[in-house]
Image (cartoon, grey):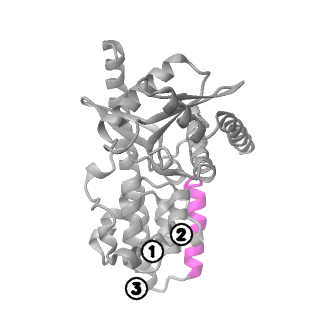
């Protein structure tokens, strides 16, 4: 890497770090607002003659004064009341819940039973940066109950995640946060990329029976610099990590060089002694075509390269799925 590229990476890291700090702060303020709102409603309902009529008037008031803010419907207001009443006596959980999105908080609140189960999934969201879909999958699979049966204590399954260092890279701005800021719902290239990545991840897990999901925007560190891999999986058949990078652009040779850089970092930091070299898959979704390329270590023998190629998801299949997902995402967005 030359000095110019190194300096640019420093700038990118500077911007992304500050952006993540802003995302985190916005989310904390939004959750605090819903908490305070829930507390206010709870106290009014319990200490006075507030009933459905006054709540309905409050809904009308919010529609009139804050028409773009999401969540202030009648069910939404009672959800805030339930949110406050559920966690008000648990100081630890009431702090943790500000570190995840409102969408994930609502899912946990409505789909779990005990406070232990709720804390378990809140911590899982913080540690693994779950999207709403990923959280729903974990809850639907009964992960908490399965873990309790095999281990006995929920808090042993995940690290304690209460400090700022636990989620500096979490992207937690959902639509509630955007509307809280009164930001326009613009459709950007980043939105497109995020939607495609989410769908590609589901497809890879569905079609690639030997793939195990490791993380999204997975951080690798080189020197004092942080870099982020779009998707990272572990392939049991190949006994190696598989990194996926998505580009909303035509394929360029430098994408291979960048992926090689990521693979070297993975092999140096994450690869275990009994595992094979990491492999990369580059997905390019431009306006006119979709291209998929593999990136493998130059030290691999032709036999190993052939073995990897056979056991990875076929390029043609990935290209077709990439095109399909891109078209669906763009069509759905155009309908909004």
The kind of secondary structure the magenta stretch mainly shows is helix
Q: Residues within 10 Å of mark 1 (few under 14, many from 20)?
A: few
Q: Which tag, 3 or 1, sits closer to the chain's start?
A: 3
Residue at image mark 2: 141
Residue at image mark 3: 47
Label 2, secondary structure: give it.
loop
- Cβ–Cβ under 8 Å for marks 2 and 3: no
What's the CA distance linking mark 3 and mark 1? 41 Å
Is residue 64 within the magenta segment? yes
Q: Quadrant of residue 328?
A: top right
Tell me which residue sits at (36%, 20%) in the image: 8
What's the CA distance linking mark 2 and mark 1? 9 Å
One can see residue 180 in this view: no
Query: Could you tell me which quadrant the N terminus lies in?
Result: top left
The magenta stretch is 52-69
Which percent across, then down, holds residue 16?
38, 34
Residue at image mark 1: 146
Tell me which residue sits at (40%, 49%) in the image: 26
Q: Is residue 262 left or right of residue 196?
A: left
Which percent across, then down, holds residue 208?
59, 49
- Cβ–Cβ under 8 Å for marks 2 and 1: yes
Q: Is residue 8 left or right of residue 279?
A: left
Q: Is residue 221 left or right of residue 35?
A: left
Which percent across, then down, holds residue 121?
42, 67
Q: Which tag, 2 or 1, sits closer to the chain's start?
A: 2
Q: Is residue 189 left or right of residue 40?
A: right
Q: Residues within 10 Å of mark 3 (few under 14, many from 20)?
A: few
Is residue 267 within the magenta segment? no
Tell me which residue sits at (52%, 54%) in the image: 176
Label 3, secondary structure: give it.
helix
What's the CA distance linking mark 2 and mark 3? 40 Å
Which percent across, then down, holds residue 292?
61, 30
């Amino acid at each position: 890497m030359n000095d110019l590229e190194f300096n640019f990476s420093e700038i990118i890291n500077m911007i992304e770090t500050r952006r993540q700090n802003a995302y985190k702060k916005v989310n904390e303020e939004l959750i605090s607002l819903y908490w305070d709102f829930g507390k206010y409603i709870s106290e009014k309902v319990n200490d006075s003659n507030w009933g459905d009529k006054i709540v309905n008037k409050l809904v009308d008031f919010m529609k009139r004064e804050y028409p773009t803010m999401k969540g202030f419907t009648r069910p939404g207001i009672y959800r805030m009341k339930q949110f406050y009443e559920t966690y008000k006596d648990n100081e630890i959980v009431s702090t943790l819940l500000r570190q995840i999105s409102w969408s994930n908080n609502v899912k946990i609140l409505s789909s779990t039973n005990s406070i232990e189960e709720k804390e378990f999934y809140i911590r899982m969201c913080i540690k693994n940066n779950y999207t709403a879909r990923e959280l729903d999958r974990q809850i639907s699979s009964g992960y908490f109950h399965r873990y309790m049966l095999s281990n006995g204590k929920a808090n042993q399954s995940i690290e304690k995640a209460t400090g700022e260092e636990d989620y500096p890279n979490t992207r937690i701005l959902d639509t509630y946060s955007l509307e809280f800021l009164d930001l326009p719902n613009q459709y950007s290239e980043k939105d497109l990329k995020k939607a495609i990545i989410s769908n590609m991840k589901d497809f890879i897990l569905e079609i690639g029976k030997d793939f195990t999901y490791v993380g999204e925007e997975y951080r690798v560190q080189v020197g004092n610099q942080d870099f982020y891999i779009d998707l990272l999986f572990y392939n049991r058949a190949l006994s190696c990590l598989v990194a996926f990078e998505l580009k909303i652009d035509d394929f360029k040779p430098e994408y291979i060089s960048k992926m090689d850089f990521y693979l070297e970092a993975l092999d140096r930091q994450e690869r275990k002694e009994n595992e094979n070299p990491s492999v990369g898959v580059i997905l390019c979704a431009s306006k006119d075509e979709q291209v998929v390329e593999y990136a493998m270590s130059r030290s691999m023998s032709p036999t190993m390269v052939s073995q990897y190629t056979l056991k990875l998801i076929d390029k043609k299949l990935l290209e077709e799925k990439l095109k399909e997902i891109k078209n669906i995402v763009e069509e759905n967005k155009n309908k909004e």
